[in-house]
């Protein structure tokens, strides 16, 4: 089975021209498949694999939200937080939005107050 494949709708699939390796190395070298049986098998395989998928253990989104809140509580701006965490400013802003939603806050200030109340800033 290929290390990656793609389906585009119910009539088209893509298989790597070079088996093994990773997607960035071979993204532009693939076979376009339009055989209904093969496309169907790949779609079924994807559905089965997706049903068994689990989140990566080290990629907890809540940790990123808390990191942003902790750094903001220290007085850092979005740009400084992004540099410190090695992420984009857009990611920092998305984490702020997640924090505000989770904390039920209408402003960053209220999010900070609620995060402190919940003990997230320790």
Image (tube, rainbow, N blue to C red):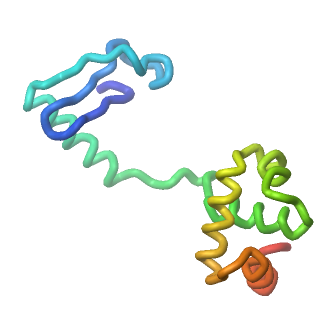
Looking at the image, residue 89 sits to the left or right of residue 21; the answer is right
Using the rendered view, name the quadrant where residue 39 is placed. Answer: top left
Q: How many labels does the image show?
A: 0
Looking at the image, residue 16 sits to the left or right of residue 22; the answer is left
Q: Position of residue 8 (x, y in %)?
A: 24, 36
Query: Which residue is found at the position 21% from the left and 35% from the top?
Result: 42
Image position of 51 with respect to 112: above or below? above
Image position of 70 with respect to 36: above or below? below
Towards the viewer: 108 or 20: 108
Q: Quadrant of the N terminus?
A: top left
Q: In which quarter of the image is the C terminus?
A: bottom right
Query: Which residue is found at the position 19% from the left and 40% from the top?
Result: 9
Looking at the image, residue 37 sits to the left or right of residue 26; the answer is left
Towards the viewer: 122 or 109: 109
Using the rendered view, name the quadrant where residue 73 is placed. Answer: bottom right
Q: Where is residue 27 in the image (x, y as percent from the top left)?
A: 42, 21
Query: Which residue is found at the position 71% from the left and 78% from the top?
Result: 107
- Looking at the image, the residue that sits furthest to the left is 36
């Amino acid at each position: 089975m290929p290390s990656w494949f793609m389906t585009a709708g119910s009539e088209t699939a893509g298989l790597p021209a070079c088996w093994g390796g990773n997607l960035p190395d071979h993204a532009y070298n693939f076979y376009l498949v339009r055989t209904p049986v093969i496309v169907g098998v790949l779609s079924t395989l994807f559905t089965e694999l997706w049903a068994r998928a689990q989140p990566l253990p080290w990629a907890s989104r809540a940790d990123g939200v808390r990191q942003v809140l902790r750094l903001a509580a220290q007085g850092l701006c979005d740009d400084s937080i992004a540099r410190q965490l090695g992420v984009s400013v857009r990611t920092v802003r998305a984490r702020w939005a997640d924090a505000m939603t989770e904390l039920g806050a209408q402003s960053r200030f209220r999010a900070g107050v609620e995060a402190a109340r919940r003990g997230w800033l320790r």
